[in-house]
Amino acid sequence: MGSDGYVPLFETKKVRGSVMYKLFAVSIFVGICFIFVYRFSHIPREGDGRWAWIGLFAAELWFSIFWICTQALRWNRVYRCTFTDRLSQRYEVEFPRVDIFVCTADPTLEPPMMVINTVLSVLAYDYPTEKLSVYLSDDAGSDITFYALLEASYFAKEWIPYCKKFRVEPRSPDAYFLSISDPNDVNEAKEFEAIKKLYEDMENRITRAAKRDQLTEEQRSKHKGFSQWDSYSSIRDHDTILQILIDGRDPNARDIEGYSLPTLVYFAREKRPQHPHNFKAGAMNALIRVSGKISNGQIIHNVDCDMYSNDSQSVRNALCFFMDEEKGQEVAFVQFSESFKNVTKNEIYSSSFRVSIEVEFPGMDGNGGSPYIGSSCFHRRDTLCGRKFDKECTSKWYKENDTESEESLHELEAKSKVLASCTYEENTQWGKETGLKYGTPVEDMITGLSIQCKGWKSMYFNPERKAFIGLVPITLPQTLVQHKRWSEGNFLILLSKYNPAWYALGKISLGLQLGYLKWSLWAPSCFATLYYSIIPSLYLLKDVSLFPQYSSLWFIPFAYVISAKYSYSLVEFLWSGGTILGWWNEQRIWLYIRISSYLFAFIDAILKSVGFSDEAFVITAKVADKEVSERYQKEILEFGASSPMFTIITTHALLNFFCFLRVVKKLAMDAADIRYLDRMAMQILLCVVIVLINWPLYQALFFRKDKGKMPSSLTLQSIGFALLACTCFVYLQ
């Protein structure tokens, strides 16, 4: 409590040991400076290796710039905790309306049962139901998804009171039923079995309809909304479809206990082939307009369809930041952390992002604001609509939300549809100054940055009980495609007017700028990584040294920087809850992503920026067949298909393997050549590490027999490319 009696609704704690870490980082920086001195003072004057030496210096310079950007995410980490009891004591009757957006785009890659489990988890939030509205944005315009939501609206009448009565956590039915056995209490056990039976019956109906990909006449007769599909042509060509399945204003919209239900809306915006639809950003902006007409919640909460709520208190936790009397007025959005339920023990695809969640996002928060990462986020509506921060302007949560539309349900639906037409945004600021930004696959990052540049703050909240739990890719192709989309989108930001280097200059802190630049520099990092992981190995074939001798004092800064960086990386990963093998897997995926996903992302971003390619959005699959799932659980890398990315990864691995064989041959022929080991120690070590990292890939190339192995045609092709590269280097240099 302050001297004026102010008791905060949230608390901010700085991480311990920051001074020690800063000293450690400075020591690495000193080591990097010594490396540069060595490179400058020992450039070969002539002969083999001069240009390779200069290239290595350029790569090391790039890695150093990238490393400096990463330090901005570690120098000032903060962690937040909330006091929901204080919030309830002060503002229980003054809570604002909250509009929740759940986004889906493909009923095949994002199964309807997964979608409605997310919807039900947020419908059952511990929050006044009359102030809660849930919108499902279905960008595929699927009648199967609409049918699933209709079934969920019936089930919600039983599920919501059951959750409140027994304080259920989590409130996704599927996750809840998997997490507990039968209750001990007899009466509770009866209700448990009854609600579970209702859920399983609903699941069977939805699953059968999804497998048929067609609804029966009986199912279509359950709701008048199915008539809107009579004029439906395709995913890219249909009218706006909007149905208010539960009208929270209706006194008859009650659960089985007689309490009011939240508003529930199905929404598929109009799409026409000749009009750009701007993917998720376009869907979100249409939702902002439509929800503004129907419920107009001051807080907008968006979640992806595979990211169910794991904590019914999440809305209240978010409001602790918005409604804090001293600091709440400057908060534009609250980004919650995310967790994933299908991550294996050792994270074969390094998909948990545990270091980002536990370290980097708190570091961004300490520099002035968390990034917006597209899901699990709570926004002020007016900041999404372009409002600039003004110290004099205050939010009156209760008074501004105390009125409801008196229009009939039919009138409300009709007027709302107009707001989702293809032509509504023409000659407006939507996608530019209003709503989510267009022009990049990572509309979230650019939107969050623009909000912060208007003077707003944001908060990152990583509660002890993970608030949102989703799914990660379970194959290597899915992982590579996902990272390609992210890195391409971030690089497009670098090429746009929203480049953090100048767009954010003077508007946000330098640390926050560097944090955004770190992600924007992902794609260009492919060239430095490719160079550093190929050229030193190739020069082993010609016995040309590109690093200081092991016996030289100049070897010390190289050894220190490398060992210190990777030792700290391991400690950081373990501190974040990972395993040693998980960290090793992360190094492998780090390499694969940077030499394939980032390379293709860089090329595609350049082509798009000069107008030679159209923007595309690739949805990551959330389902896989039984064999693939079994291999994933056993932590076996999944290849199974030809891909240009696999060609690069495999050729790279084989090239290093052939260079390694050359070293083994030389050492076998002259084991006493100590001078060779002294001169080539760093290059041999680098080559050996790359070979060890690629051991699962070599297994997929030559030993495995299952369907997840590398295709034989790609194996032969990569062997040819690697041998050709080695031969050309030796004889044409």
Image: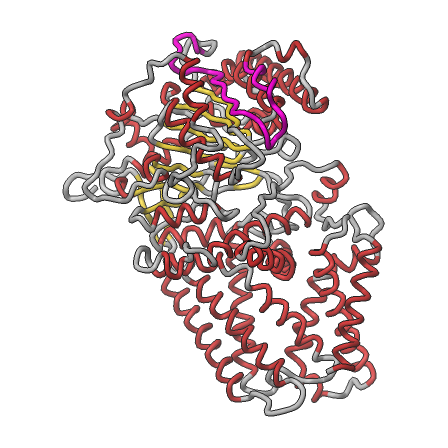
Left or right of residue 21: residue 632: right
Position of 339 relative to 363 (above/below): above
- Residue 501: x and y in percent read 39, 61
- Residue 457: x and y in percent read 32, 47
**Which of these two is toward me, 449 or 323?**
449
The region drawn magenta spans 225-254
**Which of these two is toward me, 372 or 411?**
411
Image quarter hosting the N terminus: top left
- Residue 478: x and y in percent read 65, 46
Quarter residue 108 falls in: top right
Residue at the (49%, 52%) spot, across then down: 356
Residue 467 visible (yes or no): yes
Q: Is residue 709 magenta?
A: no
Position of 45 relative to 586 (above/below): below
Q: Most extreme residue toward the bottom, as rendered?
A: 45
Residue at the (25%, 28%) spot, across then down: 90
Image quarter hosting the C terminus: bottom right
Position of 337 relative to 155 (above/below): below
Position of 203 relative to 641 (above/below): above
- Residue 75: x and y in percent read 39, 61
Q: Is residue 227 magenta?
A: yes
Quarter residue 105 falls in: top right
**Which of these two is toward me, 138 or 182?**
138
Quarter residue 154 falls in: top right
Residue at the (54%, 86%) spot, across then down: 553
**Which of these two is toward me, 171 or 369?**
369
Residue 184 visible (yes or no): no
